[in-house]
Amino acid sequence: MRFPDPLRRTLWIWQSIVWLAGWIVPRQQRPEWRQQRNRQVWYWAYFLVESSHFARGKRLELAKYYWRLFGDAFWRRYDREPFLRRADRMRRSPATCLLTIFSLVVGLVLVGGCIPAALSFSSSAVSQPERACLVSLNGKFRRFRSETLFDFASAWTGSRLLESVAPYSWGPARLFATKRTVPIWSARVAPTFFDVLGVKAALGRTFHSGDAQPCGNCAVLNHETWRVQFRGDPAVVGRVIVVDGDEKAVIGVLPANFHLASPDIAVWTLLDSASLSFTNFVERVGAVARMKDGATEGKVETDLADLSENAGYVFPASILKVTSIQTEVRRTVEMYLAIVLFSVMCAASIVYVRRPGGNLPRVPTSFGERCRWWGFFVAKSVLLLIASGLLAWAGVHWIAIYLVGSLYPMADLVAWWLFLVLSVAPLSWSIQDQQSRCRVCLRRLGIPIMIGIPGYVLLNWSGTEMVCSAGHGSLYLPDSEANWLERDRWNSFDESWADLFRGELENGPPQGE
C-alpha cells in the first residue's frame, strides 16, 4: 500500500526513533523489540490512512508515544523496581542533599561571579598597606574648596611622621554611558594620590606627579565600572567619557582589588587647585599618607590635629581620624562578617518563633549519633545560607545593572537586607528537613501514615507517622502541639523488626551506616 507523502515522512521518523531506542535494549532482545514496534508503526499508519484520521493532533499524540519508547527500552535493560528503590534511597540520603545544595552554590558562583569579587575585596592593591594610612575628616563638607584641601595637605606635609600626603574627595556624580546617564560616585584626587599608595594600574596608567596641568581632563576608571559599562574593552584607554557634563579622557583602569574610601567609586579625576570657585561639590574629603618607620596611627592622628590647628583649622578632636589601609581592610571584612552573623541570628530567631512552641527537633541521645546529627544539620544550613547570600548579592547587582545601568552605591547594603529576608526560608526548610530524617542513618523518612482523629487532641493523638526504610525506627509528628507532651517522638526499632525490612537491606546497605 502506498502512503501519502506527509505520512511517509512521519513513518520514516517513527521508524528512526524505534531504531535509536532499540540500542538501549539488551542485544538478545533487540531484534524482537524493534520488530514488534515497527509492526505497530505500520498498523497505525494503515489505520490512519483508511480512517482519514491523519490530522496534526493525532500525529502529536503518536509522537509522544514513540518518544516514550526510550523509557520503555531503558526499563528493558534495567529492572524497574530495584532501580527505583536504589534511586529513592539515593534521593533520601544526606549525601545527595549536601551535594545538591553544594551544586547550587557552585552554580551561583559561576553565574554571578561572587567569589572573584570577594577575593578582590579581601586583598589590597596598596603597596605596604601597614604603612599607608587613610586620614578621614568625618562629616559632610558640601561646597568645600579644592584649594582648602591642598592647604590641609601642605600643613600635614610638615609632619615628621609622614613621608608624603595626597588629598582626595568623593561624592555623587553622573556618567553618560553608551545610551543613558547612570548615577555613580566620583572621586577627585591629587596627582600624587596613587603614587603615595603605590597602586599600579591594571590597564593603562594612573595619575602621577606633574599631571595637574597636562592631564587636567583625564580620568581613571574603577575595574567594576570598566567591566560593566565598557564590557571590559581594552581599547577604553584614550576614549572620551562624560562625567557631570565634562568630557574626560580615560588614561587607565584600576585593579580589581583596589577599594579605598568607598568601594563603589567609579571614576577618579584630578582636583582643580587653580580655580578660586567652589570646585569641589562633594560630600566627603580626606587624604592618604605614607607613614615613616616607627609611626603609629595614634601618634599621626595627634600630630595632624596639632598641625591643622597651627594652620588655622580648628576641628573637634573626634573629627580627624587616621587609619592604616591594613586596618581599614580588616575592619571592613569584620563589619561584613558581623552583618552576616546578625542576619543569621535574626533569621534563626524568626524560624524559632515560627515553630509551634518554639521547639527544635529532638536529637539522638548517643554521642556519635549526636555528632553526626548536628554535623549534617550545620553543614546543610551553612550551605543554604551561602546560597542565599550569593543569590541576594547576584540578584541585587543584576537588577541594578539592568535598571540603572550601573552598580548603585546602595547595592551592597540592599543585598545584605535581602539576604536577611532570604535566609529565613532556607533555615526553616533545613529544620523541617532535619526533623523528617532518621536519627540513625539521616535519610529522609518515608511511608507517611495519618493516625488518630484530628480535633480530639485532648483525648487522643493525631498526627503523621513516618518509618525509616532501613528499619531503624519510626517518627511521630503531631498535627498541633497542644501541650509539652504532644511533641515529635522517635521510636527505635529493635532486631525483631529486621525481617520486615530485609528486602530493602538486600539491595544495598543504607548510606550513613
Image: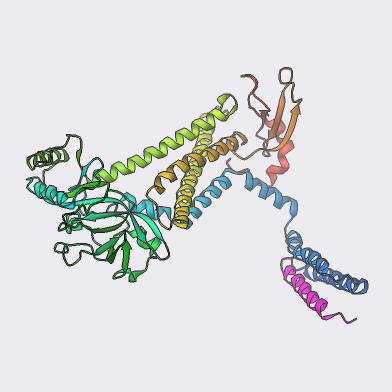
Q: Observer-nearest residue: 335 or 508?
A: 335
Q: Is residue 11 magenta?
A: yes
Q: Observer-nearest residue: 351 or 97?
A: 351
Rendering coords of residue 389 (x, y %)? 46, 45
- What is the span of residues highlighted in magenta in the rendered image? 1-27
Q: Say if 317 sits above or below 413 in the image.
A: above
Please give left or right for residue 227 compared with residue 399 in the image: left
Q: Is residue 43 magenta?
A: no
Q: Is residue 256 visible?
A: yes
Q: Quadrant of the C terminus?
A: top right
Instruction: Residue 297: name its quadrant.
Output: top left
Name the dominant secondary structure of the magenta segment: helix
Q: Observer-nearest residue: 234 or 141?
A: 141
Q: Quadrant of the N terminus?
A: bottom right
Rendering coords of residue 494 (x, y %)? 67, 29
Residue drawn at the location 81% of the way across and 66% of the way down: 57
Please give left or right for residue 58 compared with residue 111 in the image: right
Residue drawn at the location 23% of the way across and 62% of the way down: 206
Please identify the residue farthest to the front as the structure is shown.
277
Please give left or right for residue 174 compared with residue 351 in the image: left
| Colour theme | rainbow
Q: Is residue 325 visible?
A: no
Rendering coords of residue 335 (x, y %)? 34, 40
Rendering coords of residue 136 (x, y %)? 21, 43
Count of marks, rendered view: 0
Residue drawn at the location 52% of the way across and 52% of the way down: 103
Residue drawn at the location 42% of the way across and 53% of the way down: 114
Please identify the residue farthest to the top as the structure is shown.
459
